[in-house]
Image (tube, rainbow, N blue to C red):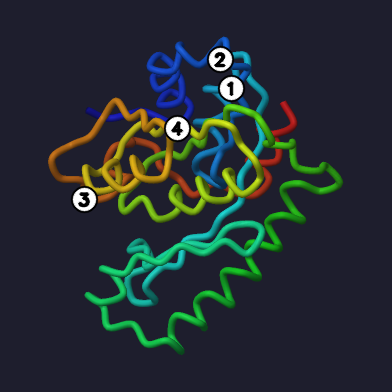
Amino acid sequence: MLYETRAKAGRALAESLGHLRDADPLVLGLPRGGVPVATEVAHELGGELDVILVRKLGVPWQPELAMGALGEGGVRVLNDDVLAQTGMSPLGLATVESRERRELERRARVLRGDRGRIPLRDRTVVIVDDGMATGATAAVACRVARADGAARVVVAVPVSSEEAVARLTKEADEVICPLVPRWLGGVGGAYRDFHQLTDQEVTDLLAT
């Protein structure tokens, strides 16, 4: 099964989220790739749209492999099995973390501009990405949402590994994913168009 684009994946994903429509959900896209998916979900559910900013801590020689993630408000999640498997040193981890923290702050300035974050307190929030491999990024997003007072946290993605779904069931109140292959080589393999989005593409979507 392949999704043509992230937007089409978002429309397909929304078909599994109809039970959330009456909850007045706040749909939070994970930049950059999750925002086109979240835009379609928010449109179909009639919910508000915002971003939730987190950064993956990728292994330096294999950036797609997450050894953890950072979120707004100083939240950090580490993927202990990846750290052990790769033998990452504390200095190496700190170097990656410092770089990604700077990028997190930059993206907040670029993507939010003068707009403040939509308050999460007492809301049902739906955290949306274009897919999950390890689930580390979505896990830290869940913790950020809970720290900000969300009443209910739902993770919704078009494709995920079995490992990531299992991980997120411990972090979210509900995990929704219509495509969980027995083996997921990479999220991009589920899409025909998986181009790297620009900041401008994301800000344009948030402005619609």
Q: Residues within 10 Å of mark 2 (few under 14, many from 20)?
A: many
Residue 45, disc: 2
Residue 93's place in the image compared with 190, above or below, is below
Is 77 or 89 nearer to us in this picture? 77
How far apart are labels 3 and 1 at the CA level? 28 Å
Residue identified by numbered label 4: 6
Q: Residues within 10 Å of mark 3 (few under 14, many from 20)?
A: few
Tag 2 secondary structure? helix
User: Residue 4, percent across and down?
Assistant: 36, 28
> What amino acid type should be assigned to the residue bearing mark 1?
Ala
> What amino acid type should be assigned to the residue bearing mark 3?
Gly
Residue identified by numbered label 3: 185
Q: Residue at x 58, y 16 (%)?
A: 23
Q: Residue at x 40, y 42 (%)?
A: 194
- Of mark 3 and mark 1, the one earlier in the sequence is 1
Q: Are marks 2 and 3 in contact (CB under 8 Å)?
A: no
State which mark lies toward you, 2 or 3: 2
> What amino acid type should be assigned to the residue bearing mark 2?
Leu
Tag 1 secondary structure? helix
Residue identified by numbered label 1: 42
User: In the rendered image, which quarter is residue 169 located in?
Assistant: top left
